[in-house]
């Protein structure tokens, strides 16, 4: 019984270690893809006055009349 418990504990420790290293590797890869940069104050002002299209508002669809069954 104790041998099975030891084998199970070793397997669990290996699983946790491998999972941890996978998370670290994925996190490191993501940070390479999307590096964090600190823009200058002038760059911030320029981007604030003329924001990129990703930061624009989306289309607003509304009904401009009464709704009928037609």
Image: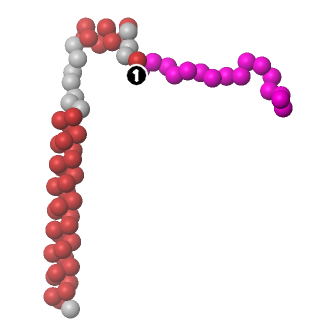
Kindly indicate the quadrant of the structure image that contains residue 29: top left
Q: Nearer the viewer, residue 18 or 59?
A: 59
Q: Is residue 6 above or below residue 66?
A: below
User: Which residue lies at the image location 21% right of the left edge and 24% below the top edge?
Assistant: 37
User: Which residue lies at the image location 84% right of the left edge and 32% below the top edge?
Assistant: 69
Kindly indicate the quadrant of the structure image that contains residue 39: top left
Q: Which x, y percent locates residue 9?
A: 19, 76
Kindly indicate the quadrant of the structure image that contains residue 41: top left
User: Which residue lies at the image location 16% right of the left edge and 82% below the top edge?
Assistant: 6
Magenta part of the chain: 55-70
User: Which residue lies at the image location 49% right of the left edge and 19% below the top edge?
Assistant: 57
68 within the magenta span: yes
Q: Quadrant of the N terminus?
A: bottom left
Q: Quadrant of the C terminus?
A: top right
Magenta span: predominant SS is loop
- In the displayed structure image, the side of residue 28 where residue 64 appears, left or right: right
Q: Which x, y percent locates residue 21?
A: 16, 55
Name the residue carrying label 1: 54
27 within the magenta span: no
């Amino acid at each position: 019984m104790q041998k099975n418990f030891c084998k199970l504990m070793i397997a669990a420790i290996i699983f946790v270690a491998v999972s941890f290293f996978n998370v670290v590797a994925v996190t490191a890869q993501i940070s390479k893809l999307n590096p964090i940069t600190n823009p200058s104050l002038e760059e911030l002002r320029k981007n604030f006055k003329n924001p990129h299209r990703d930061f624009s508002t989306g289309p607003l669809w509304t009904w401009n009349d009464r709704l009928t069954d037609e």
